[in-house]
Amino acid sequence: MRTTVAFLMTLAALSGPLMAQESKPVPKDSLRVSIPGCTKGYIFTAGKRTEDEPGNVDVPPGVHMRMNGPKNLINEIKAHEGSMIMLTGLVKKGQFQPGGVGIGGGVRIAPAPAPTGGIGIGAGVSQVFIDVEGWRQINGSCPSR
């Protein structure tokens, strides 16, 4: 009897991580993307898509994205700097379009010049963010600077 209870408890403990691997639902204002590219610190630079690693969204090569995610996952990715990776995560819809991010109803939020007539910090530059869910190493190497 005790071995049966111990077996059932072990089975329940091992099945927990399997259930956690199901992908989370994607919010209405976001897209789940897989993008090939390279990293340096917290910055991911989209690379050229190839036939064997096409990705699933039209991200122009050279786009820089700020990675957000659990620290241990980001540190894992940072340990592979210099190698091509396929990054999977969530991005807000419209971040890759010029003119800022659409928030609905035809309204877009974009950087603007400073009201004093000078150039404000970050004017004309918008940061693209990706909430990292996972990654894997792919063939290729990153260009050195």
Image (cartoon, rainbow, N blue to C red):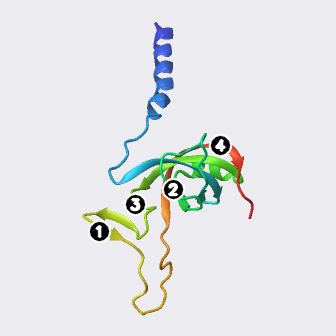
Q: Are marks 1 and 3 in contact (CB under 8 Å)?
A: no
- Name, please, the residue furthest toward the top: 1
Location of mark 4 (residue): 137
Instruction: Please indicate whether residue 138 sits to the left or right of residue 10 in the image.
Output: right
Give the alpha-carbon distance from disc 2 to disc 4, as whole Å: 19 Å
Q: Which quarter of the picture shows residue 19?
A: top left
- Picture residue at 60% right of the left edge, 59% below the top: 45
Badge 1 local density, few (<14 within 10 Å), some, or many (20+)? few
1 or 2: tag closer to the N-terminus: 2
1 or 3: tag closer to the N-terminus: 3
Spot occupied by residue 36 in the image (x, y as percentages of width and height): 59, 49
Give the alpha-carbon distance from disc 2 to disc 3, as whole Å: 11 Å
- Could you tell me the amino acid type at mark 2? Val
**Helix, strand, or loop for circle 4?**
strand
Q: Which quarter of the picture shows residue 114?
A: bottom left
Give the quarter of the figure containing the C terminus.
bottom right
Spot occupied by residue 81 in the image (x, y as percentages of width and height): 69, 53
Spot occupied by residue 123 in the image (x, y as percentages of width and height): 47, 80
